[in-house]
Structure formats: C-alpha cells, structure tokens
Image (cartoon, grey):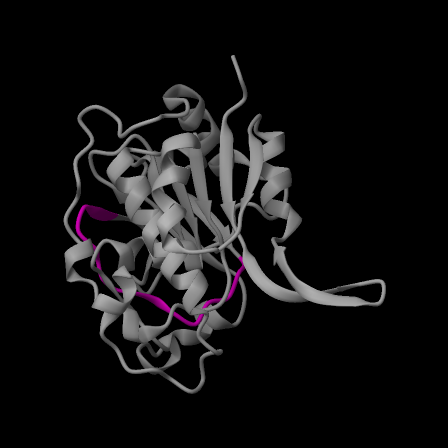
Amino acid sequence: MPRPLIGITSYLEAARWGDWVREAVLSPPAYARAVERAGGVPVLLPSLGPAVAAEHARHLSGVILTGGGELDPTLYGAARDERLGEPQPHRDRFELALARAAVQAGLPLLGVARGMHVLNVAQGGSLIPWLPDAVDSHELHTGGGHVVQVSVSSRLGEAVGDRVEATAPHRQAIRRLGAGLTPVAWADDQIVEGVELRDHPFGVGVQWHPERGDDDRLVAALVEAAARSGPRSEARPGARDLPGAAALPEEARR
C-alpha cells in the first residue's frame, strides 16, 4: 500500500543561503520528521493562494495546519492589536481555504497551535485576540508548561490518553467554537486546548505542538487515518459541507 501523502503548511519568508537572500518556502523540520516516522510522506504546501486549496484536498491523504504567527483578528470580526505581529494575509487566506476544503472533502487533518485557530475560524468561530487580557491565569499559557486534561472518549484521547504536558506558550485561544467543532481538551482554567470535528474521519486541533519531542502518537493517528482514507480525486461520499464559512468576513473568503 502506498504511504499516505501528508500536506504540511508553511511560511513564505526571506531566507539566506550563501550570498543570496530570497523569499523561500519554510517549515520547521519537526513536522516532516514526525510524519516520516509515522509512515507518511511529508509534502510542503506553499501559501500561494486559496484557489489551489481544493486541489490539495483532492490529491492529498491528510493535512497538518502548522503553528506560526497569530491570525489577523479582523478575519473573525475583532480589532487588530498592535501587540500581535504583522498580519500574513497570504498565509491566512490560503490556510482558511485549505481548512474548509479539507472539512468538506472529509480529508484527515490536524491543526497545531495556530492551526487549531485556523480550523476554528474557518468554521465560523472566533478567538481571544490577546489571552493575557482575558484570563487571570494567563501565566499558565504564556509562561511555559502546563497540564492539559483530555476527554478519553475522544479521538484525541484515544491517541494521547487523558492528560498531556503542554510546553508551548500561546497568546491566543478559542472564544467561540466554530460550527461542527467539539471541545475535547482543557487547561485547568477551562481554556479550550483541543477540539474535534463531528462527523469527520479525523479532524483534530490542539493548542500544543505534538510534533516536538519523542511522542509521535497524535501525528501517527493522523497518518493512520490518512492511510485508511487514501488520496481522493473528489469529495468523500457522504461528506457534508459543514456550516461556518458563510459566517466569515468577505476578505477571508477571497
């Protein structure tokens, strides 16, 4: 059986090699290595435009929406915050389109940190733009490691058990859940740290970075689901267009 192709979203950033400085497609190697260890074939996806997202969903076996800079708050109806980094509209538009295409096609997907936020906003949800302003326990999320409680009856719980030591700090979190999403993991202050898509072969988002370290169980679960599904040339029979995209601002749908 062919190994499943797993698309990995990426940055478009200036990079240096030798005397050259050019815009490049970049990705931390931990994602590709985790996919390869789990038996998949990693495929880097440049953020070239939302029009190609449906093609990726037709030909890949699975997708990882990777971590990175914060989503532009205007995409979910909030004001920009000067404490956030500069928006990356090309990446935001591409990944929102890819998330919607994966949901509609029944394509197994894993959202990591920013990727979970992309999935939530693609489904019509919203975020807390600056978490330290919203919770008294923000040091729990911005200062380093904390324990995440996981529902054992969820796909996430089946993969990683009932608790995870999360070490990646984050400055945003889910405020309103997108359509079709269920919370399945929480920090001690009840901030949502993991979500799943209902009626989907494998649609999981987590606020930590499962590709780091030696625990590949969650990436392996994605690759296993992708191997079962295989590549598709059209939407999975029975896959339904979950609501949520219509709730996005017009600029996010272009």
**Is 223 situated left or right of 125 in this image?**
right
Direction top: furthest residue: 1
Q: Is residue 187 visible?
A: no
In this rendering, the answer to whether 66 lies above or below 42 is below
Q: Residue at x 29, y 61 (%)?
A: 254
Q: Position of residue 115 (x, y in %)?
A: 41, 54
In this rendering, the answer to whether 233 lies above or below 64 is above
Q: Position of residue 249 (x, y in %)?
A: 21, 68
- State the extent of the magenta-drawn residues as a range: 167-182
Is 176 part of what is drawn in magenta?
Answer: yes
Direction front: furthest residue: 51
In this rendering, the answer to whether 33 lies above or below 115 is above
Secondary structure mostly seen in the magenta stretch:
loop
Q: Residue at x 49, y 57 (%)?
A: 67
Q: Position of residue 184 (x, y in %)?
A: 29, 46
In this rendering, the answer to whether 248 lies above or below 234 is below
Q: Residue at x 45, y 61 (%)?
A: 91
Is 42 part of what is drawn in magenta?
Answer: no
Q: Residue at x 15, y 57 (%)?
A: 246
Q: Position of residue 97 (x, y in %)?
A: 33, 52
